[in-house]
């Protein structure tokens, strides 16, 4: 499966998106500005033309009306003449016509003002001057002609019915004709024709401008589409695609194990989420492979992936098809079954064990996987999956591959954990209150039985006065990391006690303490241990350091070997504790420059019953003699055991036969007693 570098990916997509967002921001701004500019420009241009057009129209309409009113008035003039020519002049008819004439006069006046008003609005257009001159000045002088005509009408209207009427009647038709077809009429006709022409010209202009502006707008929109929006959209689609495929890839990485392709815990939680409730999953088995380091050494680190891949396929072949198989951790797989399948396995664990332990080929290497199994029951859901995994892991701690039992989780396993964490808290408080003190178990010379030294053993006397065995608190102190602080505290007390014994004139011999691996890994171990040794007040270093075989195994680590070398240099003797029970090789005795070997008490326990045990103890004592190492036998409880060791030439004995671990004051008594015995003899 391809591995996506999430960091690189997000940086690249972010860069793309940033750039894209900057470009699109600028593009949208430019496009919007251009579009707005075009719209404003078009609007203004069209508005200007429309305003002109509307004034032109108003000018034309009022001109037409004026012309029609003038023509109307000329008709009234003719009518007036006819009315006056009647034999019996009908004054009522005359009056009526006069009346209309007056109204026409008022109308002409009003329309003239209106027309001038509209003409004024056309000021600024190129044709304005022509119209202005046409109405106000030579050669047409329409207003002047109209004013003359109006004055005449006024005159006729006021004097028409008087006695001089007969003479006046002669000119009336002339005026009427003039208004209709004469100078005024002609001038008007010309003006109106011109006006019509200009109005239609401007209407054409409006149509053309409108067309051009529309064209420009369309071109701009098309340009924006072609140059900005389509490329932007394409780029966005590309980034989107990239995002989508990366999203899928990230989903795979988040939910599937890269080495095997099987789901991981979060992937399986998602599957459980979607699982139907008709057939719930009721059984979880975890398979925890150990000694991965060894497997890696056999196949090589590059092929470790193949090992896990092959092992996961083996799991798939071993469990029923509807099982959910997933990788829960570096060396751990989980299998979720329906209850019936789970039950089948609890009853048939041997077949499961042998299938999983069968050989696995990884290229040319053959591996027989070693593993732990654990299980838990009860409905498994996405919500309780993590909890169930913890339960199964807890149960796996009880797995023994030699026993045909699949250990199942029971609630007491949890309470053990809770109890442990409570106990760790109590240890922490105990350390603050200096409740951890050394007891001393005196060692004797194997040949003479006289005191030659002692081993400091930690005791915890809590606030209630209860004394706890180191077997109950040392493992928890190691697990919690408190062991280091505990040992340094203890060493301080040991140094003080040593000084006090000397001040009392007693000879305690060398005092050994049990070193913790954690303190040996501390970089400032040499400095701290030197400071402690100074507190003893002794000229030659009187403290020895005991390490277990397990610590010896880790002595290849730089920090541990440096600490041990520093201890040696300061004059401390190194003792290999519980010899014969761990996995240290004999070569480590040489490489670590061990001074003392302590034979484990489990061999001493079997001395009376086992020939092999006797042979082993004899061989170790002989080995120590040949290597010139001091040999201490631990756990000697009987005279026979002492005699056996003494006769073989062992150097020192530590056991209940002589002394049990005891507090400072008791040791003072023992030392004093022996001092007196020596003096007496
Ligand atoms: P160890 O270092 O092997 O200490 C010897 C243990 O054997 C002591 O048990 C001692 O009381 C016991 N013992 C000695 N002679 C006899 C005997 O004749 N018969 C029997 N049955 N037992 C005998 P203890 O004090 O309970 O300590 C147990 C273990 O706890 C120690 O084994 C050591 O591994 C660890 N331990 C004790 N104190 C410390 C400490 O300060 N630091 C560390 N790291 N471990 C400590
Ligand atoms: Ca010891
Ligand atoms: Ca021991």
Image: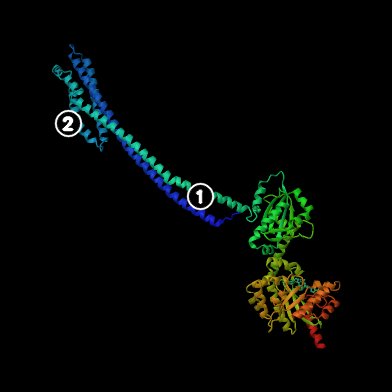
Front of the two marks 1 and 2 = 1
Q: Which mark is residue 491?
A: none
Ligand 1 sits in quadrant: bottom right
Q: Eyeballing the image, is 48 above or below 545?
A: above
Q: Are marks 1 and 2 in contact (CB under 8 Å)?
A: no
Q: Secondary structure at mark 1?
A: helix
Residue shown at 25%/28% (left/top)? 63
Residue 141 point in image, percent of width and height: 18, 30
Residue 668: quarter of image: bottom right
Residue 637 point in image, percent of width and height: 83, 75
Is ligand 1 closer than 8 angstroms to the Cβ of mark 2? Answer: no
Residue 495: quarter of image: bottom right
Mark 2 nearby-residue class (10 Å; few <14, some 14–19, many ≥20): few
Mark 1 or mark 2, earlier in chain = 2
Q: Quadrant of the N terminus?
A: bottom right
Q: Which residue is mark 1?
A: 239
Q: Which residue is mark 2?
A: 139
- Determine the residue located farthest toward the front in the rendered image: 364
Q: Nearer the viewer, residue 442 or 267?
A: 267
In the picture, measured across the screen, residue 457 lies left or right of residue 70, that is right
Residue 329 point in image, percent of width and height: 67, 57
Is ligand 1 closer than 8 angstroms to the Cβ of mark 1? Answer: no
Residue 204: quarter of image: top left
């Amino acid at each position: 499966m391809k591995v996506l570098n999430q960091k690189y990916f997000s940086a690249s997509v972010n860069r793309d998106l940033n750039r894209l967002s900057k470009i699109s921001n600028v593009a949208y701004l430019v496009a919007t500005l251009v579009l707005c500019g075009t719209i404003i420009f078009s609007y203004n241009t069209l508005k200007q033309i429309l305003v002109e057009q509307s004034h032109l129209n108003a000018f034309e309409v009022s001109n037409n009306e004026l012309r029609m009113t003038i023509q109307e008035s000329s008709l009234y003039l003719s009518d007036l003449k006819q009315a006056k020519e009647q034999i019996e002049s009908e004054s009522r008819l005359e009056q009526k016509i006069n009346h209309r004439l007056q109204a026409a006069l008022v109308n002409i006046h009003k329309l003239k003002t209106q027309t001038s008003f509209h003409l004024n609005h056309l000021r600024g257009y190129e044709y304005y001057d022509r119209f202005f001159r046409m109405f106000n000045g030579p050669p047409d002088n329409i207003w002047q002609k109209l004013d003359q005509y109006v004055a005449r009408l006024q005159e006729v209207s006021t004097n028409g019915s008087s006695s001089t009427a007969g003479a006046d009647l002669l000119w009336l038709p002339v005026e009427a004709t003039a208004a209709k077809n004469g100078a005024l009429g002609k001038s008007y006709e010309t003006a109106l024709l011109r006006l019509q022409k200009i109005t239609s010209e401007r209407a054409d202009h409006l149509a053309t401008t409108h067309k051009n502006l529309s064209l420009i707008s369309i071109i701009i929109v098309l340009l924006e589409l072609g140059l900005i929006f389509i490329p932007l959209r394409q780029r966005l689609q590309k980034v989107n695609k990239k995002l989508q495929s990366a999203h899928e890839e990230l989903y795979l990485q988040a939910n599937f194990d890269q080495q095997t392709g099987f789901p991981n815990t979060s992937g399986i939680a998602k599957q459980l989420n979607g699982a139907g409730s008709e057939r719930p999953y009721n059984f979880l088995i975890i398979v925890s492979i150990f000694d991965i380091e060894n497997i890696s050494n056999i196949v090589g680190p590059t092929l470790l992936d193949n090992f896990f891949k092959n092992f996961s396929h083996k799991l798939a072949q071993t469990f029923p098809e509807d099982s959910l198989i997933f990788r829960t951790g570096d060396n751990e797989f989980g299998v979720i079954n329906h209850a019936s399948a789970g039950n089948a396995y609890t009853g048939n664990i041997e077949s499961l064990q042998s299938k999983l332990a069968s050989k696995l080929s990884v290229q040319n290497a053959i591996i027989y996987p070693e593993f732990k199994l654990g299980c838990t029951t009860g409905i498994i859901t996405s919500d309780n999956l993590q909890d169930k995994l913890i339960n199964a892991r807890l149960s796996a701690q009880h797995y023994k591959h030699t026993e045909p039992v699949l250990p199942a989780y029971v609630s007491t396993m949890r309470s053990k954990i809770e109890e442990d964490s409570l106990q760790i808290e109590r240890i922490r408080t105990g350390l603050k209150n200096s409740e951890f003190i050394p007891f001393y178990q005196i060692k004797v010379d194997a040949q003479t039985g006289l005191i030659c030294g002692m081993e400091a053993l930690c005791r915890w006397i809590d606030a209630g006065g209860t004394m706890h065995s180191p077997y109950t608190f040392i493992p928890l102190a190691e697990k919690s990391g408190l062991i280091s602080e505990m040992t340094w505290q203890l060493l301080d007390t040991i140094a003080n006690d040593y000084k006090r014994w000397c001040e009392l004139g007693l000879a305690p011999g060398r005092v050994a303490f049990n070193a913790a691996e954690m303190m040996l890994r501390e970089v400032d171990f040499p400095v701290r241990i030197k400071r402690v040794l100074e507190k003893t007040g002794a000229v030659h270093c009187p403290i020895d350091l005991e390490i277990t075989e397990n610590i010896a195994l880790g002595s290849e680590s730089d920090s541990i070997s440096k600490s041990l070398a520093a201890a040696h240099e300061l004059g401390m003797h190194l003792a290999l504790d519980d010899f014969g029970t761990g996995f240290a090789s004999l070569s480590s005795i040489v490489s670590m420059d061990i001074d003392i070997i302590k034979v484990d008490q489990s061999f001493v326990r079997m001395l009376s019953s086992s020939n092999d045990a006797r042979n082993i103890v004899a061989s170790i004592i002989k080995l120590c003699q040949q290597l010139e190492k001091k040999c201490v036998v631990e756990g000697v409880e009987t005279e026979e055991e002492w005699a056996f060791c003494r006769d073989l030439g062992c150097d020192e004995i530590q056991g209940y036969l002589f002394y049990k671990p005891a507090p400072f004051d008791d040791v003072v008594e023992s030392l004093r007693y022996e001092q007196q015995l020596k003096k007496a003899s």
